[in-house]
Image (cartoon, grey):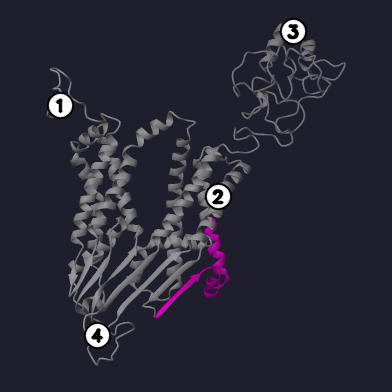
Amino acid sequence: MPPPFVPRQQAAPAAGAAPAQPTPFGLFMVRTVKGDWLGALRVAAWPLALLFVAACALGIWSNQDIDDLDIGWGTRMRVALAALLQGVGGGFGVSSDGTSDLGGAAVVGEAEVSGLPLLATAVWIGALVLAARSERRRLPRPTLSAGCEAALRIGAVCGLGGLALGLYASPSYEGLELDSAPGLTLLFSFLLSTFVAALVLTRGETDAWLAGRPASGLRTAAGALRTAALALVSVVALASVVACVVLLAAEEEISAGEVGSLLALLPNVGALALAFAWGAPLDVKWNISDWDAGHESAGYGELAEAAGGWAVVGTLAGGLACALLLGVLVARRSTSRAEQLWAAGFFVLGVLLLAAVAGAGFEARSHEASNSLEDPGYSTGPGLTGESFTSSAEVAAGSAELLLFALLWSFGGALLVPLLRAQFGKGGPGRTGLGPDNGQGAYVRPGYGQPYSPGYGPQGYGQPGYPGGHPGQGQPTAPGHGQPGYGQPGYGQPGYGQPGYPGQGQPPYGQSAPGQAGHEQAGQGKVGQSQAGQGQSQAGQGQGPGAPGAEAPGPHPPHPTGGGGTAPQP
């Protein structure tokens, strides 16, 4: 018979043994929870307060139809707040329980508006960046992860604040109820705020880490990403302003409500206008309960028919201006050709993302709560005779065309502008240019194919390497004739007798060197030789090779500017 099973007891830890150490992630979370929540509240209060104040201001607006429905300021403000919260991930849906009278029928259903008001997103991000930069100055950094810990706290406070605003932005009116999706607001506001705060608060550590890796691809990618973000904001801002001016000028009569709606959706309009200017058509799709469905696409052809050929020319000019603006920013901020290409690629991805979220859509599903209010055969509209009613509509830019033309315009501007800047002497990547000198920034004389030698380098003629140069215009060197001159080894150097061409280190046969001629005529020996090496001429002590009467009858080195003759006198 086998012995009964006896469970093995674990050995007790030895006396004096050190307790188990927490993991790095555990320490990170402990420091995050025990950190400065008051500082996180100071940062998160700015974007939350700005959205709330903007909703209060928008709730003041009203018109005759809203006044007839007797919708008060509080309801209008909460509706505006729900619309603004869409910019940080919220929703905007309306549901009916059948007690409201819509078009002469009691309707049960729901409708949802999809879209992202980019202006609200920009206000949230801008306020968060400014507040986080102010907090970064007072943030203690006992560890390298202090910035990430503070970013998590800020994101948590922003998420909870967004949840509170989303719960508040759910008004109801006569059987209609607005749903702002508070759960989505909590999630996306937390993610967006944490990401933005981490970028700001860890800027110093990130730059220090990248500075220690000058040849790393991550440093190139980080610089390209910052350049692309700046270029995207600048280009969309330019397109938004131009589109706003054009739309306001095209309308003969426009109301204050239409102007306010245009300004509220200005970044969305700018993103779609940029896509349209670069060749992507605007696609409009609709489907009303299979009763009316269609698809329209508006491009350059439709614009020419509606506004004439000059409108197409102006649109192309606007697209060219945006591409050149991108190229100028890339050329001024990039330090290499690879960084230029990376910046253009990131910019294309940003344009595609903005165009995707800049569009708007609408979807509704409903049915009658009871029979028709009049006769049984009475119909209040398509699909409302006791049947379900569905409708949808969408406005967006053509994604396939935008991908193609964004690649052409972006890479064209990012590659063309640096070449133009290098051609006209403005410099290319890093303000040095990628011209014939392969990005070294040295001036190359046309026709010679190589930079000037140290004697006539880019700092100008008259360096101490040339005996007749001006003092103080070059690098300090030892006096004497032993400095390199223009082109081949200069006259007065050791090795003067090596074979060469006249005027490039060896005079014609039977003629003396310029420095020797000056010494023979002056007869001063060592005194004249030392003064000639310094490029100076003093009376009674000797003459340099450039002094009157000391010229050799042979040819002389040409002037750095291209002219012939000897170098200028000091």
Mark 3 → mark 1, Cα distance in angstroms:
110 Å
Residue type highlighted by circle 3:
Gln
Q: Dot 2 lies on which element?
A: helix
Circle 4 sits in a helix, a strand or a loop, which is it? loop
Q: Pinpoint residue 244: horizontal percent, then vertical percent.
A: 42, 64
Q: Earlier in the sequence, mark 3 or mark 1?
A: 1
197 displayed left or right of 357: left
**Residue 138, image quadrant:** top left
Q: Circle 3 sits in a helix, a strand or a loop, which is it?
A: loop
Q: Amino acid at mark 2?
A: Phe
Residue that mark 4 sits on: 104
In the rendered structure, which disc, 2 or 1, sits on the residue that comes first in sequence? 1
Say above or below: 385 vs 81.
below
Front position among marks 2 and 3 = 2
Q: Is residue 331 visible?
A: no
- Residue 266 in view, yes or no: yes
Q: CA distance from mark 4 to mark 1?
A: 79 Å
Q: What's drawn in magenta, residue-wise? A: 291-320
Check whether the beta carbons of the residues at disc 2 and disc 1 lie within 8 A of each other: no
Residue furthest right as drawn: 510
Say if the magenta span includes residue 314. Answer: yes
Mark 2 / mark 4, whichever is N-terminal: 4
Prevalent SS, magenta region: helix
Q: Which residue is mark 3?
A: 524
Cβ atoms under marks 2 and 4 closer than 8 Å: no
User: Few, some or many C-alpha atoms within 10 Å of disc 4 (few <14, some 14-19, many ≥20)?
Assistant: few
Q: CA distance from mark 2 to mark 3?
A: 67 Å
Write the residue at 27% across / 67% down: 93
Which residue is denoted by mark 2 in the rendering?
Answer: 411
Instruction: Please name the residue that numbered disc 1 is placed on.
Output: 8
Work out whether residue 463 or residue 140 is closer to the camera in this orientation and state it. 140
